[in-house]
Amino acid sequence: MQSLETEQVCLTLKPGSLVLDFLEPRVVLSSAPFNGGLTRARYVLNRTVGMDFCPIDVQEAVLQEVQKVNLPPEQTVCCLTAVDVWKFGEGRAEERGIHATAFVTAGLGNLSAPGLTPISDHEPGTINTIVCIEANLPTAALVEAVQIVTEVKARVLRDHQTREGFDGTGTSTDTVTIVMLDGKTEKYAGAVTPVGRAIARAFETAFREALL
């Protein structure tokens, strides 16, 4: 087990797991399959599962994964990936006193182009992104933060193509999780705001490191 702790985040690596502990419940906006949406959570878990992971009851299966790590399910947002979560990328950035930290795991075996890639069963290959932003933001700005991550991801992937030959912008099972930590109040998180720039720079650094 390995760990890294700052004033507001404790990162712990366990077998098959990357655990972020924010020391108290935080506002989280996430597309994760377990406790996703707009919620409050103390933990975010990025969990490695097998390439054949395809349960009938996803919620029950993910609940079991959370319990294996001894985390309280009601306080945990959980993402899943087939890649080794220990091979994560990390990025940090600061813009005018706004600090952002990003953690990314990246599997590109399932690249897709929305609206072009045909409907199919989910296959292994996921980009999981967790961004911690030290700012007090309204919900709309949290949505902007997800947009920033998505736009930067598409830029980084511009030279990668799907199996059909389309320009890939992500995978069909990507998740984005934004965690709001203590910080000064900001109204917006667009591309030319301090929040947006900090998120973009931190995420790009982490994403490119995860792709190595």
Image (spheres, grey):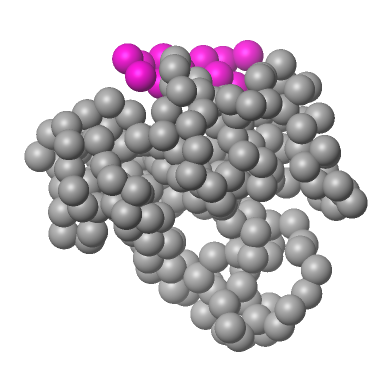
Identify which residue, 89 or 127, lies in the foreground. Answer: 127
Inspect this view and state whether residue 206 appears. Answer: yes
**89 left or right of 142?**
right
Classified by dominant secondary structure, the portion drawn in magenta counts as strand
88 drawn magenta: no
Which contiguous range is marked in magenta?
1-13
- Which image quarter is the N terminus in? top right
Return the residue found at the far left.
96
Residue drawn at point x = 13 percent, y = 34 percent: 97
**18 left or right of 122?**
left
116 up-or-down from 180: above or below: below
> For residue 168, what is the image quadrant?
bottom right
61 up-or-down from 114: above or below: above
Q: How many marks?
A: 0
Residue drawn at point x = 55 percent, y = 19 percent: 12
154 up-or-down from 139: above or below: below
> For residue 136, what is the image quadrant?
top left
Image location of residue 60, percent across then percent down: 82, 38
Identify which residue, 152 or 88, lies in the foreground. Answer: 152
Image location of residue 38, percent across then percent down: 48, 44
Residue drawn at point x = 33 percent, y = 29 percent: 181
8 drawn magenta: yes
Inspect this view and state whether residue 83 appears. Answer: no
Image location of residue 29, percent across then percent down: 46, 45
171 up-or-down from 15: above or below: below
Image location of residue 207, percent across then percent down: 45, 50
**137 left or right of 53?**
left
Residue drawn at point x = 51 percent, y = 29 percent: 41
